[in-house]
Amino acid sequence: MPDSPRVAVICGSRSDLPSLKGCFDVLDSYGIAWEVSVISAHRQPAALREYVATAEEGGVQVFVGAAGLAAHLPGVLASMTARPVIGVPLDGGSLGGADALYAIVQMPPGVPVAAVAIGSAGAKNAAHLAARMLGLGDPELAERVERFRQEQAAGAEIGIDPRG
Ligand code: RP5
């Protein structure tokens, strides 16, 4: 039987799914069980509330909300759960994702959303951040996060002379 998901990724539209591939890949690389759902905060608020309750019962510990335009999804998620919410602003609109970034990052005090970068960099970082959060209570996962950091550092090109 597959592990029950620890991370729930929710996006506002099917059109958002391609931007989230990096998020899914990074979660897989850490061996974190995840699930993805398409539920719009604007178009399906009742379904979103129902989903959050079911996900919590099923053991989801971190929510990732990804949306473009007036991206209220992560903020609405944060109003419905006490578990951490990471918001990924997507760049589908004519404002290049700045609209979604502002909508996600400008939460009122007491309703926190951890906003990451616009687009695919943010999608990957949402997964890295979720891994670090979950790693606080999971030493094996924390070790995998540390291994990733070391591999990343080893892969960086240090001391390259630009003159060749
Ligand atoms: C947002 O509106 C979605 O997250 C998506 O980024 C954007 C456009 O949605 P569609 O019109 O493609 O469904 O709520």
Image (tube, rainbow, N blue to C red):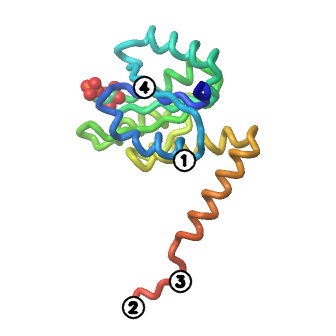
> Disc 2 marks which amino acid?
Arg
Kindly indicate the quadrant of the structure image that contains residue 129: top right
Residue 56 has which mark? none
**Quick one: quadrant of the N terminus?**
top right
> Is residue 156 shown left or right of residue 89?
right
Give how far across and how far down residue 104 sits, in percent: 46, 34
Give how far across and how far down residue 33 sits, in percent: 57, 33
Residue 163 has which mark? 2
Q: Label 2 to label 4, Cα distance in Å?
A: 48 Å
> Of the residues under marks 1 and 3, which one precedes in the sequence?
1
Local SS, label 4: loop
Would you call the spot at circle 4 few (<14 residues within 10 Å), some (14-19), or many (20 or more)? many
Q: Badge 3 is on which residue?
A: 159
> Disc 3 marks which amino acid?
Gly
> Of the residues under marks 1 and 2, which one precedes in the sequence?
1
Local SS, label 1: helix
Q: Label 1 to label 3, Cα distance in Å?
A: 29 Å
Would you call the spot at circle 1 few (<14 residues within 10 Å), some (14-19), or many (20 or more)? some
- Asked if one can make out residue 109 in the rendered structure from this viewpoint, the answer is no
Q: Quadrant of ligand 1?
A: top left
Q: Label 1 to label 4, Cα distance in Å?
A: 29 Å
Residue depicted at x 65% and y 58%: 147
Q: Badge 1 is on which residue?
A: 29
Q: Badge 4 is on which residue?
A: 72
Residue depicted at x 76% and y 45%: 139
Nearer the observer: mark 2 or 4; the answer is 2
